Image: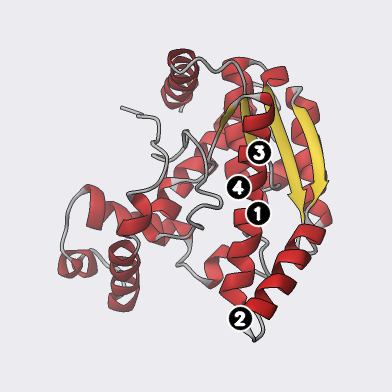
Amino acid sequence: MKHTWHTLQNGLKDFCAANRFDKVILGLSGGLDSALTAVLAADALGGKNVKAIMMKTRYTSDLSIKIAREIAKLNGLDYQELDIEPLVTAETDFLQRAFGESVKGITAENLQARIRGQLLMAFSNQNGGLVLACGNKSEALTGYCTLYGDTCGGLMPIGNLYKTTVFELARWRNTQSRALPEEVITRAPSAELAEGQKDENSLPPYPVLDAVLRLLTDEQKTPEEACAAGFAPATVEQVRRLVARSAFKRRQMASALDIL
């Protein structure tokens, strides 16, 4: 984990230097991916050069806000909170009139993510700074992300880390110094775009998902070989289908840092 962390830290520092950025901007959601990305950026560039914005809606839990504030304090981030619910409401009302019907669930969910992406880019245009996308490899491969929303950014630092590795790296980083509150590591992952939403409502549990993804993508095994390795055929088919159907998203995502 030490090698991985320092590789990512140096990679982010070099990328910013090569592209003449001295600060970065990211959405700090209270989830682990954005938390780890924020800590990585603080280690690489210094906390004062990391603009971290909590963009809350009606679905943002009190725990998420508490976690975001604590991460900002622990790492000396330039932290700001914005209530984007009025923007979400205004755009939802506009779209309902345009559609002539109620806004569907997935439309409403993605709308929130895209408003956040738009705001991050506006901060970049206004004040400078590289917007960081905070996605991981598990999300990228399965398309569990919003195009032009949480994929928005010039670099996705942890985009080559599977979610299970994100957990491991977060635990390792906290052994060096306390940079992450324990709750952000132990809580169930959620995009918080709808009431009661959890990642595992849409995906297999991450240990299973990542193991199947490694077989199908990294090792180029067939679905039959993945099943022979002990995974349920229905799970393998679900993962295979998600990977195939989301290729168009990956073509438009920000580049990820190498971790060789």
Q: Which residue is at a point 74% across and 73% down the rendered structure image?
A: 93
Q: Nearer the viewer, mark 2 or mark 1?
A: 2
Q: Which residue is at a point 68% across and 34% down the rendered structure image?
A: 123
Name the element at disc 1: helix
What residue is disc 2 on? Answer: 99
Q: Quadrant of residue 76?
A: top right
Q: Are dots 1 and 3 in contact, CB under 8 Å? A: no
**Residue 49 falls left or right of residue 222:** right
**Residue 189 falls left or right of residue 182:** left
Q: How far, Cα to Cα, is label 3 from label 4?
A: 9 Å
Which mark, by number, is residue 117?
Answer: 4
Q: Amino acid at mark 1?
A: Ile
Crowding at mark 4 (Cα within 10 Å: few <14, some 14-19, many 20+): many
What residue is disc 3 on? Answer: 122
Q: Residue furthest front?
A: 98
Choose between 86 and 222: the one closer to the eye.
86
Choose between 132 and 260: the one closer to the eye.
132
Label count reads 4
Q: Which x, y percent locates residue 46?
A: 66, 16
Q: Nearer the viewer, mark 4 or mark 2?
A: 2
What residue is disc 1 on? Answer: 115
